[in-house]
Image: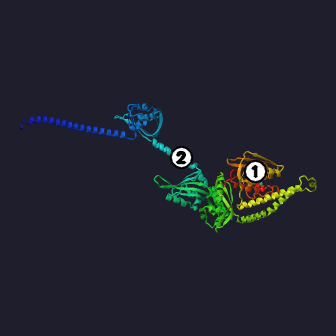
């Protein structure tokens, strides 16, 4: 074995050498295998990374694109950027400027070139870019980053673009700015007094010109505390009000609140309507107080004046012995003065809660109600005599008058009425009437017999007695005496008629007669006793009537004698008979005399009413004729009208139904 050793050794050496080489190869193989393994792994990792990265880019809401080469060929663009471009989804492989030609004029190439050629990244904020959307240029705002893209050899191969579409945010910002601007404009141009105060110190943040004017402390008040600027309001309870609003969040509203401001060394009193409101931030925390106020000094002074004069009037009205009340436009009472309460023995509320008609004498309720209704609808003044029950249950005569109160436009807002006691007057009147009735009655018989004797004497005198006449003008004198006696008789019968009406004793004797012949007869008689007058009759209609012949005659005579009496410069009177409506007949008497003014046309039908200014000695009379005529016609269910113009003449007309109905 030993002898073989060198050979072995040599061989062994070779083997060892080979083995070593083999080992080396094997190690190398192992290393390569491992290296291969690791390359494979890192390849996989790289793929994964690219995959993740692509996912990130795809799902990003940012706008991302990679542009390659100097022509900026779109290599990749994610969905959001394609949507903003609005040129479809198939844009890869095309040049950016072919896809979006509108970018040419917007300086985008310069930004890209800066990144591509100079390798300088470019960032821009709020960059406006207009995109062509179906022919319409729509403005967008972007935050941009343009970044150079490198290859493996650190050479620039393109530009990566990442952008954020901030159009909506920008729009909201602009709107906010605009609205804030508008809001400030509004505050400053407002006539209302406006201020915004911050913090517990009430630091003036905003104060408009109007409020500065009222404060009178100049224009530079912002940034100072309200109480430092207006120390005079500290003692007027203002800090407490502001503190309440600031601490509790309560809104404080006041009307016509008096506040003194120190202006040019003088305390000036003003009245203000104001609202102090807590200002809250978005989390609801109170951060200040807003002041909105209006100066209402003139109005407040006026209101105080009105209140004062209202108090004075109320006192005056209560002090008056007359019964004064106010009603609404429907005639419902809303106020009674003290006199009413004293008279009725009722409280204010009791009076308001019951109908005023309850106080009126039961016989007069219907009349009063009708009169009130009439005045409410015609807007005429009310003027009636009515008996009202006092607290002892006795009915006392009153003269009740009411007149409407109107606003500036002339609309009626309420009615004021005054009732005056005329009980004593009524009693005196009654006594006078009784006396007159008695006297008239007593006088009528002797006077009628005087008239009879005069007529006898006249009849017994020869017609042609010129010789005796020359010595003793008996006939003309007797004629005069007869006229005067007739006047007396007419007066007496008017007096008697009057008392008959007062006592409701005037009864009609209804008979059928021809109105036309009756009128003609009356005219003949009147012509006989008024020789030099011109009485004309126009008969447009002819009819028989059921009426009181004498009373109708009395009315016509009254109209005609008035027409003659009140026409000193004319002797023409025109009568007309016509049919004013089916079943009625009318007689009118027209003169060309002194006329009656409008205000008095309603009054002349009242008892004893004579127009003042017509000298009593110029026109004799007592103011009874028209009153009687009116009563007579009303009892025939007819109506009397007057049309007249001062200085031109008058026309009196009555209409009655052809057949009298009770
Ligand atoms: P009198 O006896 O006073 O005439 P009336 O009742 O007949 O009484 O008339 C009332 C008043 O109406 C008269 O006083 C007169 O002022 C006025 N009056 C009546 N008729 C006429 C007329 N035709 N023209 C002018 N005024 C008249």
Query: Is residue 265 visible from the viewing direction of this image?
Result: no
The verdict on label 2 being within 8 Å of ligand 1 is no
Q: Number of labelled discs?
A: 2
Pointer 2: what residue?
A: 181
What residue does disc 1 label?
518
Mark 1 falls on what kind of element? helix
Whether 345 is drawn above or below 612: the answer is below
Q: Which residue is drawn at 59% across and 50% down?
A: 191
Relative side of 68 to 621, left or right: left
Taking the image as shown, residue 595 lies to the left or right of residue 212, namely right
Query: Image point 70% across, 47% down: which residue?
Result: 579
Res 386 quadrant in image: bottom right
Q: Which of marks 1 and 2 is nearer the N terminus?
A: 2
| Residue at image coords 13%, 34% | 14
Element at badge 2? helix
Identify the image quadrant of residue 484.
Answer: bottom right
Q: Position of residue 305 (x, y in %)?
A: 65, 59
């Amino acid at each position: 074995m030993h002898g073989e050793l060198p050979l072995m050794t040599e061989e062994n050496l070779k083997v060892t050498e080979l083995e070593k080489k083999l080992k080396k190869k094997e190690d190398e193989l192992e290393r390569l295998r491992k290296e291969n393994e690791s390359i494979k792994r890192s390849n996989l990792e790289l793929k994964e990374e690219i995959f993740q990265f692509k996912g990130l880019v795809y799902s990003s809401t940012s706008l991302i694109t990679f542009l390659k080469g100097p022509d900026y060929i779109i290599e990749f663009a994610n969905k959001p950027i394609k949507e903003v471009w609005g040129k479809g989804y198939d844009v890869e492989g095309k040049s950016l400027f072919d896809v979006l030609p509108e970018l040419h004029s917007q300086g985008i190439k310069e930004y890209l070139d800066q990144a591509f050629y100079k390798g300088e990244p470019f960032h821009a904020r709020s960059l406006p870019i207009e995109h062509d959307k179906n022919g319409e240029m729509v403005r967008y705002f972007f935050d941009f980053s343009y970044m150079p893209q490198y290859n493996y050899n650190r050479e620039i191969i393109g530009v990566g673009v990442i952008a954020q579409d901030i159009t909506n945010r920008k729009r909201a910002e602009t709107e906010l700015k605009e609205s804030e601007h508008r809001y400030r404009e509004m505050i400053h141009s407002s006539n209302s007094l406006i201020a915004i105060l911050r913090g517990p110190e009430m630091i003036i943040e905003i104060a408009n010109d109007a409020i500065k004017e009222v404060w009178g402390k100049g224009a530079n008040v912002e940034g100072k505390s309200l109480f430092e600027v207006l120390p005079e309001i500290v003692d007027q309870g203002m800090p407490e009000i502001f503190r309440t609003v600031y601490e509790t969040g309560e809104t404080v509203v006041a009307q016509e609140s008096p506040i003194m401001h120190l202006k040019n060394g003088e305390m000036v009193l003003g009245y203000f309507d104001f609202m102090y409101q807590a200002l809250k931030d978005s989390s609801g925390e109170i951060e200040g107080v807003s002041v909105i106020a209006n100066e209402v000094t003139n109005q407040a002074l006026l209101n105080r004046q009105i209140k004062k004069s209202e108090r004075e009037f109320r006192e005056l009205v209560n002090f008056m012995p007359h019964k004064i009340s106010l009603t609404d436009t429907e005639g419902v009472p809303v106020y009674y003065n003290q006199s009413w309460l004293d008279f009725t023995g009722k409280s204010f509320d009791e009076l308001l809660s019951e109908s005023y008609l309850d106080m009126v004498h039961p016989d007069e309720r219907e009349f009063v109600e009708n009169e009130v209704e009439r005045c409410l609808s015609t807007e005429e003044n009310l003027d009636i005599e009515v008996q009202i029950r006092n607290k002892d249950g006795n009915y006392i005569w009153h003269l009740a008058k009411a007149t409407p109160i109107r606003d500036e436009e002339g609309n009626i807002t309420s009615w004021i009425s005054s009732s005056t006691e005329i009980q004593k007057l009524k009693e005196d009147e009654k006594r006078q009437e009784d006396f007159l009735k008695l006297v008239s009655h007593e006088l009528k018989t002797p006077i009628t017999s005087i008239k009879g004797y005069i007529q006898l004497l006249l009849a017994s005198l020869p017609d042609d007695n010129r010789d005796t006449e020359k010595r003793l003008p008996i006939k003309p004198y007797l004629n005069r005496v007869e006229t005067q006696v007739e006047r007396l008789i007419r007066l007496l019968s008017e007096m008697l008629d009057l008392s008959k009406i007062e006592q409701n004793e005037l009864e009609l004797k209804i008979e059928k007669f021809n109105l036309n012949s009756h009128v003609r007869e009356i005219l003949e008689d009147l012509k006989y006793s008024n020789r030099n007058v011109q009485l004309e009759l126009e008969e447009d209609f002819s009819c028989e009537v059921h009426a009181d012949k004498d009373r109708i005659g009395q009315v016509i005579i009254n109209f005609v004698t008035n027409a003659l009496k009140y026409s000193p410069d004319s002797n023409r009177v025109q009568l007309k008979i016509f049919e004013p409506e089916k079943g009625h007949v009318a007689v009118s008497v027209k003169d060309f005399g002194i006329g009656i003014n409008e205000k008095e046309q309603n009054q002349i039908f009242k008892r004893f009413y004579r127009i003042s200014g017509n000298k009593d000695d110029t026109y004799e009379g007592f103011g009874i004729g028209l009153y009687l005529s009116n009563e007579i016609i009303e009892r025939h269910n007819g109506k009397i009208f007057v049309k007249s113009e001062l200085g031109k003449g008058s026309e009196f007309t009555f209409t009655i139904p052809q057949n009298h109905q009770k």
